[in-house]
Amino acid sequence: MRRFDGSTLLVATHNAGKFEEISALFSDRGVTLVSAATLGLAEPAETESTFAGNARIKAHAAAKASGLIALADDSGLCVDGLDGAPGVYTADWAETGSGRNFGMAMQRVCDELAAGADSKRTARFVCTLVLAWPDGHDEVFEGVIEGQIVCPGRGSNGHGYDPIFQPEGHTLTFGEMDRWEKNRLSHRARAFAQLLTCFT
């Protein structure tokens, strides 16, 4: 496994909430983080059908454009009762003509579960992290947290689909949890724990 040997890590995202979460996970690592949005980098089209494929597209595009080692995250909600949807299209379900509306996306999940013959509410959040170097090398890490869909959603913390996801073994949704508690056990934290092997 290749070690991170730089001082600045480019986080290949234009999502302020995601950048904040990743920054918190790196808070004691002595690494300076900068986002693709701050550098004005273009967002590449995510044309793959897997989380790893899309994370690779974003990480390599950012590394090539900036000359920095880049970290990209592709993550999503996979609901068993919806045959794994929204999956890699998790963000797309929230798209509107004027930005993302996750309230609408959560309602769609709940409506489609209610209308389907298969009412299984089990679900998981998946996070794939790709660390890419400008020379084309990469390392891939995946974290998963199991849980269930709760309709209607509860809580206003976090972001995205957090209010409708209740992790296994807990009574609160991600939307009701303190952000630090959520960050400690989330799919992103689990992938990040593996990523840290590149920073030791």
Image (spheres, rainbow, N blue to C red):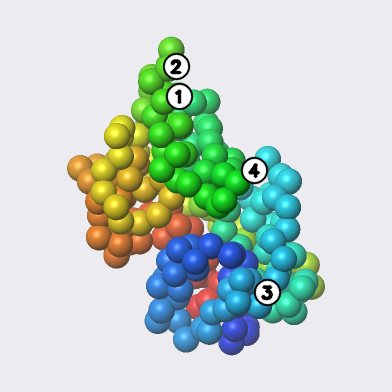
Q: Earlier in the sequence, mark 1 or mark 3?
A: 3
Amino acid identity at mark 2: Gly
* Residue at numbered disc 2: 116
Q: Are marks 2 and 1 in contact (CB under 8 Å)?
A: yes
Q: Residues within 10 Å of mark 2 (few under 14, many from 20)?
A: few
**Residue at mark 3 to residue at mark 2: CA–CA distance:** 42 Å
* Residue at numbered disc 4: 50
Spot occupied by residue 44 in the image (x, y as percentages of width and height): 73, 58
- Residue 40 circle label: 3
Does residue 69 appear in the picture of this structure? no
Q: Residues within 10 Å of mark 3 (few under 14, many from 20)?
A: few
Residue drawn at (41%, 43%), measured in percent from left and top? 103
Spot occupied by residue 23 in the image (x, y as percentages of width and height): 45, 73
* Residue at numbered disc 1: 112
Q: Residue furthest top?
A: 117
Residue situated in front as seen by the camera: 96 or 3? 96
Give the structural element (helix, strand or loop) at label 4: loop
Amino acid identity at mark 3: Gly
Residue situated in front as seen by the camera: 58 or 111? 111
Q: Earlier in the sequence, mark 4 or mark 1?
A: 4
Q: Nearer the viewer, mark 3 or mark 2?
A: 3
